[in-house]
Image (cartoon, rainbow, N blue to C red):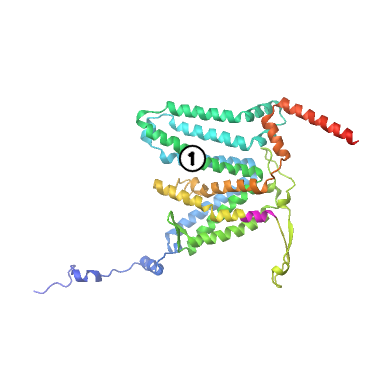
Amino acid sequence: MQKDTGSGDVSPSHAGRVRHRRRPNETATDGNRANGTVLLVSDQNKYKSMLIRTYSTLWMIGGFVFVVYMGHLYIWAMVVVIQIFMATELFNLLRRSSEEKQLPGFRLLNWHFFFTAMLFTYGRFLSRELVNTVTSDHLLYKLVSGLIKYQMFICYFLYIAGFVWFILTLKKKTYNYQFKQYAWTHMILLTVFAQSSFTVANIFEGMFWFLLPASLIVINDIAAYLFGFFLGRTPLIKLSPKKTWEGFIGASVTTIISAFLLANVMGHFQWLTCPRKDLSTGWLTCDPGSMFKPEHYFLGDWVPQWFPWKEVFLLPVQWHALALGLFASIIAPFGGFFASGFKRAFKIKDFGDSIPGHGGITDRMDCQMVMAVFAYIYHQSFISPHNFSVDTILDQIVRNLTYEEQKSLYQQLGEIFRERQFMQS
């Protein structure tokens, strides 16, 4: 009796020789793995993701440009809204509905600390602008000056009230959860709110110092995505497997060049370079200062004979922009790596889903927070004058003297000026 050769049974010795018909997508994948790597551009599913991401990016850029056109106060409002969204996303990470049911009103405590931090931070950053806005109204001026003078005490009292509130709400079965939430809230205020608040300080120092750093982060992010999408082969860091060396290097070069060129473009608009000294929304005109006045550079023997330009005019701020570009391309991405590690620790893909193709607001702001702090510190260290300016002295007078003391100071200064004028005559 002959064996049926058409049977589905296969001898063990020939099991390894069984071949399966390749599907078209498998063929393409194997071809791309010839060198042991896979290009992201070869993944057809990524094109749909890229399209959604592109649409979202265009909408965000369009909205951002509109808010910048509206002025400083509207940008501040935008930053506050972003901070509230970020806090909401982060508060929800450790939220447990079972424990929350046993603690009615406990969620309000997080927001109490959040708005206390907001009052303290913006009260310190914008005290001068607030006072300058109400100088025409005597009663309102006295009220605002008093609030600014005792602002630190008011904020401290609000914090202590929240601390007492927390202690009084402690329950035996939820000690662990409540203390985790308390620590988590303070970490959010320190690493997220405090850093992002420096953005507002940059805005009122001159929109240039907000817009240029923020734009460099956007450029770096887009360039890294495109270079990595089309050329990426070598993984950059394990925390973020999709990041590649090709994307990192390509984005760094693009960002530094863009910083130098964008600084020249933005530096010619007083709307961007003038500091805002109040909370109004009117148009700005001012002396741009030496940083934004063109300087002549003769190239001479530095360029070949065929080169058409033998001299150039550059703004001094362009050299400082290179430092911002260098930080935005090399250091600021580590804010994104930190966020990637953070998400891995919590086993989540994104912080939220409010932006299609991007995730949550926090996913877009991780590098911006790091950049905002550096831009503020760099401006205060290398750009802002270190001597006592009129604005600095006026700020101290407004903050520390009552209205009557300010009036007395004004009268004494008047007498000093009259005596000097009499002596000179």
Q: Nearer the viewer, residue 189 or 7?
A: 189
Bounds of the magenta segment: 316-322
Q: Nearer the viewer, residue 40 or 324?
A: 324
138 in the magenta segment: no
Q: Is residue 52 above or below residue 120?
A: below
x, y percent for residue 176: 38, 34
Under mark 1, the amino acid is: Ile
Q: Nearer the viewer, residue 70 or 312?
A: 312
Q: Is residue 80 above or below residue 254?
A: above
320 in the magenta segment: yes
Packing grade of label 1 (10 A; few <14, some 14-19, many >=20) is some
Q: Is residue 128 visible?
A: yes
Our reading of the magenta stretch's main secondary structure is helix
Q: Which residue is mark 1?
A: 188
Give the quadrant of the C terminus: top right
At numbered mark 1, what does the secondary structure look like: helix, strand or loop? Answer: helix
User: Who's the residue at 60% across and 48% down the image?
Assistant: 375
x, y percent for residue 235: 44, 60
x, y percent for residue 199: 59, 44
User: Who's the residue at 54% across and 35% down the image?
Assistant: 117
Q: Is residue 398 above or below residue 242?
A: above
